[in-house]
Amino acid sequence: MIKDRGNIKWTSLMLTEHREKLRELFNRDNEQKKPELDEQKKEELDFIIQMAVKQNLPIIIYYFEDRKEQKIRGVIRKYVSLKDLLVISDDKKDKYLNIHSIIDLKISF
C-alpha cells in the first residue's frame, strides 16, 4: 500500500487562499447542528426539570453550545423564567444554562 502524505505534498503548489478555504471546509465538517425537539420531548424535559427542582435530584443535562453537544452533571438550584435560564450547581460552581439549548435530560441516582 502506498503511504500518502495527504495535503502536505500539495501545499507548496497551493495559494494561501486555497489553504484557508480547505481549513474552513474541514472545520465546517466537524460542526454539528442542533437537533429540533418535538412538542412531546419538550413536555418530557419540562416535567423532568420540575421534578428535579422540587425534589433536589441530581441530573445530567445534555445541551448544545459552541456548535457541539456538551453535558453537565449537577443539581438545578432554580429556574429564572424571565430569561429562560437554569442555575445548575455542580461540585465546583454554578452555571447558567439557557433552557432552549437543552437537548436531553437524565436523572442520575
Image (spheres, helix red, strand yellow):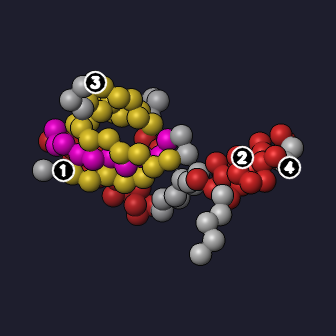
Which residue, given by chain and number where applicable, does mark 1 sit on? 108
Q: Position of residue 43 (x, y in %)?
A: 37, 56
Looking at marks 3 and 2 on the same chain, the residue that comes earlier in the sequence is marked by: 2
Q: Image point 35% across, 29% down: which residue?
A: 95
Judged from this view, the residue extending furthest toward the front is 2
Looking at marks 2 and 4 on the same chain, the residue that comes earlier in the sequence is marked by: 4
Q: CA distance from mark 1 to mark 2?
A: 39 Å
Front-lying residue, 64 or 15 = 15
Left or right, 23 with reference to 52: right
| Residue 39: quarter of image | bottom left
* Residue type pointed to by label 2: Glu
Which residue, given by chain and number where applicable, does mark 2 sit on? 24
Front-lying residue, 74 or 18 = 18
Q: Nearer the viewer, mark 3 or mark 2?
A: 2
Judged from this view, the residue extending furthest toward the bottom is 1
Q: Tell me: residue 67, above or below residue 87.
A: below
Q: CA distance from mark 4 to mark 3?
A: 50 Å
**Decide: marks 1, 3 in contact (CB < 8 A)?**
no
| Badge 2 density bin: few <14, some 14–19, many ≥20, Cα 10 Å | few
| Badge 1 density bin: few <14, some 14–19, many ≥20, Cα 10 Å | few
Q: Image point 24% across, 25% down: which residue?
A: 92
| Badge 4 density bin: few <14, some 14–19, many ≥20, Cα 10 Å | few
Q: Position of residue 60 (x, y in %)?
A: 27, 47
Q: CA distance from mark 3 to mark 2?
A: 35 Å
Which residue, given by chain and number where applicable, does mark 4 sit on? 13
Q: Is residue 102 visible?
A: no
Q: Tell me: residue 63, above or below residue 84.
A: below
Left or right, 96 with reference to 109: right
Part of the protein shown in magenta: 56-65
SS for callout 4: helix
Q: CA distance from mark 4 to mark 1?
A: 54 Å
Left or right, 18 with reference to 83: right
